[in-house]
Image (cartoon, rainbow, N blue to C red):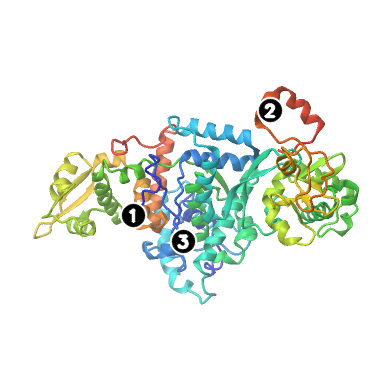
Amino acid sequence: MEEGRAERRRRTEAPSHPQGGTRRAGVMTDVHRRFLQLLMTHGVLEEWDVRRLQKHCYRVHDRTATVEELEDFINNINSVLGSLYIEIKKGATEDDGRPVYALVNLATTSVSKMASDFAENELDLFRKALELIIDSETGFASSTNILNLVDQLKGKKMRKKEAEQVLQKFVQNKWLIEKEGEFTLHSRAILEMEQYIREMYPDAVKICNICHSLLIQGQSCETCGIRMHLPCTAKYFQSSPEPRCPHCNDYWPHEIPEVFDPEKEREAGTSRANKRSLRSRQH
Amino acid sequence: MSEQSKDVCDPNSAAEASNSEVHSSLGVPGGLSPPASQAATLAGPESPPLGPTDAPLASPPPQAPSEEGDPKALQQAAEEGRAHQAPSAAQPGPAPPAPAQLVQKAHELMWYVLVKDQKRMIIWFPDMVKDVIGSYKKWCRSILRRTSLILARVFGLHLRLTSLHTMEFSLVKALEPEELDRVALSNRMPMTGLLLMILSLIYVKGRGARESAVWNVLRILGLRPWKKHSTFGDVRKLITEEFVQQNYLKYQRVPHVEPPEYEFFWGSRASREITKMQIMEFLARVFKKDPQAWPSRYREALEEARALREADPTAHCPRSSVSED
């Protein structure tokens, strides 16, 4: 019988999946299970929420244990989830780099993840919006442009009024974000669908030059055209007095945003409500 | 009902297979696993179940309506009915899919159920078949079984058939007893492993285990009645006297047998302190199989777990001196 990480923990492995490939050395306890349950319930969570959640799970199931470092905690769980083709994925909001987490299905190769909620024509509306967003320069698609495509939708005929409501449904379900009449992808959609998007739109898709992940919103070099996420430029140019394009070395013409600092976030707790009304944040 | 049983997945038997509690009909046993499933090798002599007709809003199987009736009688009647159906139900059909495909379907179903639950949508059995299982309908029982197992082990959730009438499932939180794993592997209590081996054997047999059978099993561990063991000492004395004195085992003479033979039963203390679910987990660990490879035993274990939960919803697991470090 395997001891797994029994040296480090009092609890030992759960029985492994007989046909799930190689035996996983992860440790699944009720702490982890509750964590997974709650993460799944919320869909996508910001890092500070995730930390609170983790602490809550320890409190409920294992008061005496020391709370494991979040990264290790999550890696631990992911080693068990691997054989199920799901994982807790970490991403960042594209506008201000707030770390977010979601439980995603790696095996999804289509928009069918959303299929359970939405009718055929609604899914097609999302696909159309997605294409417009990917093709756009800014990463945003205007409401007008999306609504103009309602005639081309598969399935039952949809009126523009109805389509507006469907778009709002997408926003509520955290698939899209709306900003001044324009729509872009929610960080959740990016986390969940990155693989699908890269497979479906290999020519149109944009990639960040720094982190090499899917890029919807970002800054681009006007000379050579490479793109970077806003939080990626923040980190990359953090201590550069004169920011230069990493590819062509030309002067980087955009304002460099601040690196996301969770500490500052906590201190600014009371003013968060104000911040929310000013910018529609992804979280 | 024609012998279309293999064509259609019966949500009730599928639910039984997934070991969820069915409040209404108790008359439908889990049935034989399809050949593709590993579980078939250790499944008891259970006949394939009848299924409803193909319509998505099929009425539940005939046994269902007598809801508050005697469940055991229903079960027996169902099994007898099935025994007759079994020979003619075997039709030549498409080859069973590779186990890996069934596993993949189970993963898809797991995600599907999780997403439905996340969106607080009804998990409707016909939807499950239409959206996920699709052409693997015939194997939906084993797929559902595997999905339930994963959900329980990884998420601590039970996939339960909440209403046979509407064919609705729901995800219910469940707590898993884990102390036993810790104890079975703990160096401080090796006797627990030995005791568990014997208890498991008795449990799987479903009746007393003859002493000869017990020694056959212990021989695998290198234990012989006449040999002194470095850890256990006099093994025979341990299991026939000490464990008996502690009420973990009963050691009784088999009636009407000459020359005299003895058999082991669970002692009252074992029944109090050790749950059937703990035994199933132990078996799964030792034999590297799904606990559901022993379907009727697993079902029993689930029923016991439910009864325990209903008796004391606040209890995490039964208190046990065996399970303390």
B5 displayed left or right of A108? left
Rounded to the nearest whole Å, what is the CA distance between mark 1 and mark 3?
16 Å
Q: Amino acid at mark 3?
A: Gln
Rounded to the nearest whole Å, what is the CA distance between mark 2 and mark 3?
48 Å
A196 displayed left or right of B213? right
Residue B4 % position (x, y): 54, 69
Q: Mark 3 belongs to which subunit?
A: A
Q: Secondary structure at mark 1?
A: helix
Q: Secondary structure at mark 2?
A: helix
Residue B134 % position (x, y): 62, 64
Q: Are marks 2 and 3 on the same chain?
A: yes
Residue corresponding to mark 1: B286
Which of pointers 1 and 2 indicates the residue nearer the eye? 2
Q: Residue at x 87, y 39 (%)?
A: A180
Q: Mark 1 belongs to which subunit?
A: B
Q: Check if mark 1's residue and mark 3's residue have beta carbons within 8 Å.
A: no
Q: Residue at x 37, y 43 (%)?
A: A7
Rounded to the nearest whole Å, what is the CA distance between mark 1 and mark 2?
52 Å
Residue B173 shows in the view? no
Which residue reaches farthest left? Answer: B259
Give the label on residue A264, or none.
Answer: 2
B102 displayed left or right of A254? left
Q: Amino acid at mark 2?
A: Lys
Is the residue marked by circle 3 packed among few (<14), some (14-19), or many (20+) residues within 10 Å? some
Q: Secondary structure at mark 3?
A: loop
Residue B90 % position (x, y): 47, 73
Q: Residue at x 27, y 49 (%)?
A: B199
Give the label on residue A19, or none.
Answer: 3
